[in-house]
């Protein structure tokens, strides 16, 4: 039977490129479409996720601390291949349930970033499973969740701006409360990994899809595209520096050093996004049409 609450979240998620309000406002969600364990019927469920620093993302089968595993988990055990929507992209993935030792390590990291996971585990006698979702490689650019390339570009850019704003907000809150060490490091790690993976996917999609298309249609754009490719490499270097700073023991995280790296990344990424919009949006938008998304 369809779940009215989930149906509302799914509709809002798809209408707003992954952002929802109400109970899940501010949460990091994916839509998982799994095949029913008994029937094979597709079922779509909104699920919170935890970034893992690589291609895979992690989902935790908490069910709010219920005594039984959620249906989507049973579906993935029976049929590990699924479809994932993250607000920007839709892709096929392979689910792998983590073995106990790795599960415990990942779950501990998740608790550092959000103590609510510990509260869920305390409510139930079952060991809450953690599932890794591995994207299945495919040829060509990823499938975008937008009505046009111009809209997708603006939506993606605004997501990255939002992630940077979250990081800056966390630093501000930490300064007010005096928070340092483990909690700040864990929070930054989540946002950094989300931003890193999102930018990697976006830049890969551009270099496989939008850039060749525009180069073919607008040969005079070649210098701008070369500049954008070089900026992709520079931003990847800055992201790797930030990733390394957050990869150490959270207790040893130096907020001052990380803040300096965040400020440098913010400055260069915002300049890149703005230049790209100035150069590409007019060429991706049909004459007389609006790109459809504002900042």
Image (cartoon, rainbow, N blue to C red):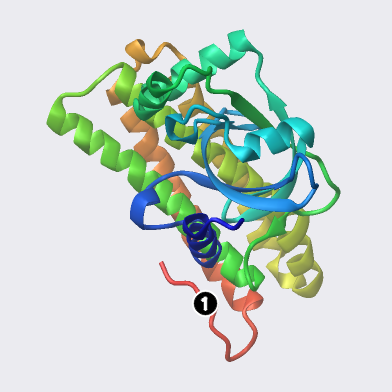
**Residue at position x 69%, y 68% from top?**
221
**Residue at position x 47%, y 57% from top?**
5
Location of residue 126 in the rendering, given as x and y in whole percent from the top left corner: 52, 18
**Is residue 6 positioned above or below 200 on the image?**
below
Location of residue 89 in the rendering, given as x and y in whole percent from the top left corner: 65, 54
Asked whether residue 134 appears in the rendered view, the answer is no
- Quadrant that contains the N terminus: bottom right
Residue that extends furthest to the top in the rendered view of this protein: 101
Q: Residues within 10 Å of mark 1 (few under 14, many from 20)?
A: some
Image-quadrant location for residue 264: top left
Image-quadrant location for residue 121: top left
Image-quadrant location for residue 261: top left
- For numbered disc 1, what is the local secondary structure? loop
Asked whether residue 80 appears in the rendered view, the answer is yes
Location of residue 178 in the rendering, given as x and y in whole percent from the top left corner: 15, 24
**Residue at position x 68%, y 23% from top?**
97
Residue that extends furthest to the right in the rendered view of this protein: 139
Give the left or right position of residue 161, taking residue 92 as reference. left
**Is residue 192 positioned above or below 285 on the image?**
above
Location of residue 84 in the rendering, given as x and y in whole percent from the top left corner: 67, 47
- Quadrant that contains the C terminus: bottom left
**Which residue matches tag 1?**
292
Viewer-nearest residue: 113 or 240: 113
Viewer-nearest residue: 281 or 52: 52
Residue that extends furthest to the bottom in the rendered view of this protein: 288
């Amino acid at each position: 039977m369809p779940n009215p609450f989930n149906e509302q979240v799914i509709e809002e998620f798809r209408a707003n490129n992954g952002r929802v309000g109400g109970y899940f406002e501010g949460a990091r969600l994916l839509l998982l479409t799994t095949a029913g364990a008994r029937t094979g019927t597709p079922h779509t469920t909104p699920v919170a996720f935890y970034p893992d620093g690589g291609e895979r993302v992690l989902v935790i089968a908490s069910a709010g601390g219920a005594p039984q595993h959620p249906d989507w988990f049973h579906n993935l055990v029976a049929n590990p291949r699924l479809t994932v929507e993250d607000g920007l992209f839709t892709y096929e993935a392979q689910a792998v349930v983590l073995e106990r030792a790795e599960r415990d390590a990942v779950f501990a990291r998740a608790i550092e970033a959000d103590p609510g996971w510990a509260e869920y585990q305390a409510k139930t006698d079952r060991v809450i499973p953690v599932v890794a979702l591995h994207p299945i490689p495919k040829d060509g650019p990823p499938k975008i969740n937008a009505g046009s390339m111009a809209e997708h570009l603006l939506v993606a850019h605004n997501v990255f701006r939002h992630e940077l704003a979250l990081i800056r907000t966390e630093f501000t809150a930490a300064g007010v409360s005096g928070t340092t060490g483990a909690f700040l490091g864990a929070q930054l790690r989540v946002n950094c990994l989300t931003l890193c993976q999102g930018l990697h996917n976006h830049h890969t999609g551009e270099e496989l899809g939008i850039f060749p298309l525009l180069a073919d249609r607008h040969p005079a754009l070649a210098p701008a595209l070369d500049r954008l490719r070089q900026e992709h490499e520079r931003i990847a270097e800055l992201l790797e520096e930030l990733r390394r700073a957050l990869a150490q023991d959270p207790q040893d995280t130096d907020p001052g050093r990380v803040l300096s790296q965040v400020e440098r990344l913010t400055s260069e990424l915002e300049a890149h996004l703005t230049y790209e919009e100035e150069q590409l949006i007019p060429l991706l938008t049909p004459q007389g049409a609006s790109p459809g998304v504002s900042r």
